Image (cartoon, rainbow, N blue to C red):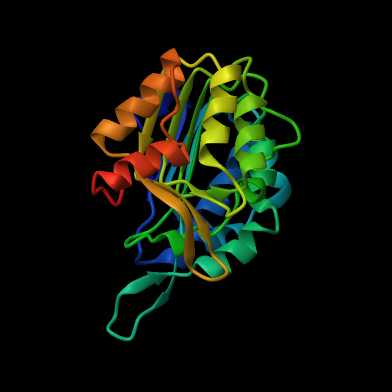
């Protein structure tokens, strides 16, 4: 569904919702909308796609028509990984197929057209989301080679990546980035979470930081954890937020994790 917000009469923003019924119809609708924006020449600074099925980035992707998004300053894209129906009728995530489609680069192509962004949210979420459903890496959904020159606010949800990808994304925006929000981040096995945040803390000058959900190393190939799982609940999230804003000691270290395990906590 398409919902104009209170600015829409002046062509200032557009909000798009999806649901699990009529997935194909809504995928086609978003493609038509983006084409219409480009053809009409509308200057649209805000676009909120609150949920769109990953199939949009396959056969229905509007290709060259994303050039009409060049005036965007605020963009939210929530990719829904729901793909197939379980025997008892529920829809379930299809992370493998979603990953294959996103690896083709359509989402990167879309974001690369919006170089004026000051606010960006990218999420890969679905009902019953699990770590094994983390479909795509940062490098498959966000253009890393050239940073957004004006990006002030970055929000990522349910995305996995290597230590290098996380670090590159954050540090390449050190000049402008002031607000950071990460939800349920999955780090590939060779990476170190503490290294990411320590490096980012030394480069960034954040004014706001928010962390939610589980953060962990996870090997998708064999379904095994590697290292501690950090639950960014109220206490832990506040500690990490405080570190990123004010400095001090980063808590996401093996020694800190071992201290909590000795106290009988399986997760922070």
Instruction: Give coordinates of residue 230: x percent, y percent.
Output: 37, 44
Residue at 46% across, 64% down: 132
Q: Nearer the viewer, residue 114 or 127?
A: 127
Residue 210 shows in the view: yes
Q: Quadrant of residue 172?
A: top right
Instruction: Give coordinates of residue 210: x percent, y percent.
Output: 37, 29
Left or right: residue 251 versus residue 110 is left
Number of labels in the image equals 0
Return the residue found at the far bottom.
87
Return the residue found at the far right.
145
Instruction: Give coordinates of residue 195: x percent, y percent.
Output: 57, 34
Is 266 drawn above or below residue 170 in the view shown? below
Is 184 drawn above or below residue 145 in the view shown? below
Residue at 29% across, 46% down: 262
Q: Quadrant of the C terminus?
A: top left
Return the residue found at the far front.
262
Q: Nearer the viewer, residue 211 or 3?
A: 211
Residue at 63% across, 15% down: 175
Is 157 drawn above or below residue 206 in the view shown? below
Q: Nearer the viewer, residue 17 or 150?
A: 150
Q: Nearer the viewer, residue 128 or 17?
A: 128
Q: Quadrant of residue 200?
A: top right
Left or right: residue 128 versus residue 65 is left
Residue at 38% across, 58% down: 126
Left or right: residue 122 versus residue 58 is left
Instruction: Give coordinates of residue 107: x percent, y percent.
Output: 63, 48
């Amino acid at each position: 569904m398409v919902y104009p917000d209170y600015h829409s009469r002046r062509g200032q923003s557009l909000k798009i919702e999806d649901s699990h019924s009529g997935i194909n119809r809504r995928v086609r609708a978003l493609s038509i909308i983006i084409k219409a924006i480009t053809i009409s020449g509308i200057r649209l600074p805000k676009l909120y796609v609150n949920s769109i099925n990953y199939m949009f980035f396959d056969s229905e992707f509007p290709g060259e028509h994303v050039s009409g998004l060049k005036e965007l300053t605020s963009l939210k894209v929530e990719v829904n990984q729901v793909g197939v129906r379980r025997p008892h009728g529920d829809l379930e995530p299809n992370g493998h197929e979603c990953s294959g489609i996103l690896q083709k680069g359509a989402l990167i192509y879309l974001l690369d057209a919006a170089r004026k962004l000051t606010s960006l949210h990218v999420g890969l979420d679905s009902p019953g989301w699990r770590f094994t459903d983390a479909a795509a890496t940062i490098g498959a959904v966000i253009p890393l080679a050239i940073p957004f020159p004006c990006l002030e606010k970055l929000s990522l949800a349910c995305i996995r990546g290597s230590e290098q990808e996380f670090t590159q994304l954050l540090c390449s925006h050190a000049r402008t980035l002031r607000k950071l929000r990460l939800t349920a981040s999955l780090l590939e096995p060779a990476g170190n979470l503490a290294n990411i945040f320590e490096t980012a803390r030394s480069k960034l000058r954040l004014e706001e930081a928010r962390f939610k959900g589980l953060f962990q190393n996870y090997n998708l190939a064999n379904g095994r954890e590697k290292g501690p799982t950090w639950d960014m609940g109220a206490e832990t999230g506040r500690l990490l937020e405080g570190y990123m804003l004010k400095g001090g000691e980063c808590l996401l270290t093996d020694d800190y994790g071992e201290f909590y395990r000795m106290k009988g906590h399986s997760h922070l």
